[in-house]
Image (tube, rainbow, N blue to C red):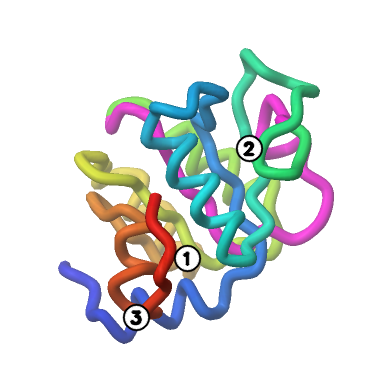
Amino acid sequence: MTPSDERIARALLETRTIALVGASMKSDRPSHRVGAYLASVGYRVIPVNTGHVGRPLFGETVVGRLADIKGDVQLVNIFRNSDDVLPVVEEALTALSGLRFIWMQLDIQNAEARRLAEEKGVLVFENRCTATEHRRLLNSAKSA
């Protein structure tokens, strides 16, 4: 099912904190550009990457797992291969009590992860870029 623009905009407006799974320290990588953009427009973006734990990124400290995050996270933004999404969603559903949205970036889809999240009442977006949708729907002048 393709989400409506209204549903996408609502998710972006209701989100304050984003856990960005697969965050890269390399500025030329899509996960870095998207995370930097989202932080620049006011979101708290918590980078998640086991290879960079403890390093600063997006004004936060990189954590290794979603379970390491303290505080509320409304949206998990996933930069992983489609086949690797299910364990991320399972951990998110277990570790993040305030979770409302799962967002799989461009070219990322996983039917089982979608089903599991939706059964728990979490809205799922697949194959979409959060930065692109934010610019398009919320009229931000910044770019990723």
> According to the image, label 2 marks what residue?
47
Q: Residue at x 32, y 66 (%)?
A: 133
Q: Residue at x 39, y 68 (%)?
A: 134
**Visible residue check, residue 85:** no
Q: Earlier in the sequence, mark 2 or mark 1?
A: 2
**Visible residue check, residue 123:** yes
Q: Residue at x 48, y 32 (%)?
A: 87
> According to the image, label 3 marks what residue?
7
Residue 74 image position (x, y, % from top left): 61, 64
Q: Earlier in the sequence, mark 3 or mark 1?
A: 3
In magenta, the rendered stretch is: 62-82
Main SS of residues in magenta: loop
In the image, residue 113 lies in the stretch drawn in magenta? no
Q: Amino acid at mark 1?
A: Val
Dot 3 lies on which element?
A: helix
Spatial separation of the CA atoms under disc 2 and disc 1: 21 Å
Residue 31 left/right relative to 97: left
Spatial separation of the CA atoms under disc 3 and disc 2: 25 Å
> According to the image, label 1 marks what residue?
122
